[in-house]
Amino acid sequence: MAVLPTRPAPFFANKNRAFWYLHGAGWVGAMALRGIQGVVNGQEFGFLMIVFIATVTGFSLSLVLSAVYRNLIGRPAIVTWGFTALALFTAVSTQVLIEAWVAGLYFSDRETTLTQLFLLYLPIELPLLGGWTGLYYAINYFLQLEAQADRLERLEAQATSAQLAMLRYQLNPHFLFNTLNSISTLVLLKETVPANAMLTRLSRFLRHTLISQPGGTVTVEQEVETLKLYLDIERMRFEERLQTEFDISEEAAEGILPSLLLQPLIENAIKYAVSPLEEGAKISLSAQISGTRLRLVVSDTGPGLKDPVDATRTSLPTSASPDSTGVGLANIRDRLAQAYGTDHLFEIRSPVDGGFTVVIEIPFEREGEEELVALVPPPELTTHPSLREGGAGIGPGTGKQDGSPSVENSAYPRAMGQ
């Protein structure tokens, strides 16, 4: 759904243990390399003792340097690099001086001064401790960057979860508002039996929906069950005027989608297709698999858009209803964008002869499985440009099928839904 930052490698999960592994392996490798070079160059066997003492000295001094560098990381650059240079100079001088003194004792029969030996070993020890210093800072800065990336990932995940929760909680109060209005009307008409039945079904619906996580997902089958609970409530208002049809393939029923994604579409269809028509209307829901995509189609046989030929709008128009809370389609668009980025299709169609259809395509994945992503996603399976932030208008061949204009071409109030 989104590109996640890299996480710290398992080797560095325990930084203390990783330090000792790398520290010990580095100095053992350096000792072995110098010893092999000395033997190849014809040095006497006693030369290995000098190498051993120099390695132990360097190992000890680098431990001291690690303690110094650990306190310098994170300080102002001039402080960090200034004291690093001073500590490195002190450590190298100590290392070379000790090695030169030991070598002087070993080569006491030769006319070699301590200064000459110091200058002899300086080009060896300076790159060694200098390289160790560079690696220490490089690894620690790398781990700091990964830790920051990990914190950023968690914060982004929390922000996304909070936004999804906000969008999800917009739906329940809105539906509750409409249902309570209906119950209030029944009470005013003294129809207590249907009012009580509607309250009972409302409690079942809320119990069914509120137990799920706000930003969670459900299977298509579970979503359809929730929709049927909702339709049971609405059918008490409209009776035979509300007709429904479900066409859910067995494979599509196993696909997952954000919970309560389709409920506002059904509510939208009831408000603008079933309610205004004396004969009512039919609401259809289809869920099919198309390649690696889950295709969801919600349609109705209502009057459709009021002005299907108006091409002046470039964004979702707001509802003309004074009871609108301004969620509906815009809410679904935002939830899809949060969950799938641009890897989804959200298209609205309304044929000239009436009816209203919303098509949603998202990556097909089963519960507990990783998302199936096509190697080269087809370009048409992305959010319609005019439905993104600050809609970009209608382009040729977008948002239409079989002569059906996109909702952006109309002032029909249902476009924002509710």
Image (tube, grey):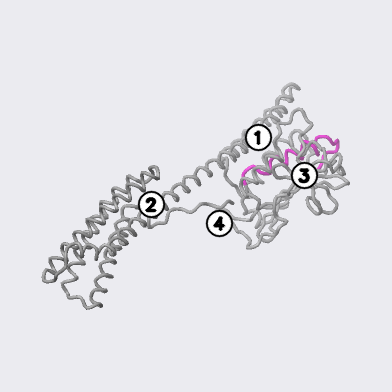
| Left or right of 373 on screen, residue 66 | left
Label 2 sits on a secondary structure element that is: helix
Amino acid type at mark 4: Glu
Question: Residues under labels 1 and 4: Cα distance?
Answer: 35 Å
Which residue range is magenta in the image? 258-282
Q: Where is mark 2, residue-wise?
A: 140
Q: Which residue lies furthest to the left in this view?
A: 109
Residue at label 1? 201
3D distance between C-alphas at marks 4 and 2: 33 Å
**Chain-order first, disc 1 or disc 3:** 1
Write down the residue under mark 3. Answer: 283
**For residue 10, above or below residue 160:** below
- Quarter where residue 310 is shown: top right
Label 2 is placed on what type of residue? Asn
Q: What element carries label 1?
A: helix
- The answer to whether residue 270 is magenta is yes
* Category of crowding for the residue at label 2, using alpha-carbon neighbours closer than 10 angstroms: few (below 14), some (14–19), many (at least 20): some
**Mark 4 to mark 3 CA distance (whole Å):** 32 Å
Residue contact between numbered discs 3 and 2, judged by CB atoms under 8 Å? no
From the viewer's perspective, tell me whether residue 280 is left or right of residue 17: right
Of the residues shown, which amino acid type is indicated by label 3?
Ile
Q: Residue 370 carries which label?
A: 4
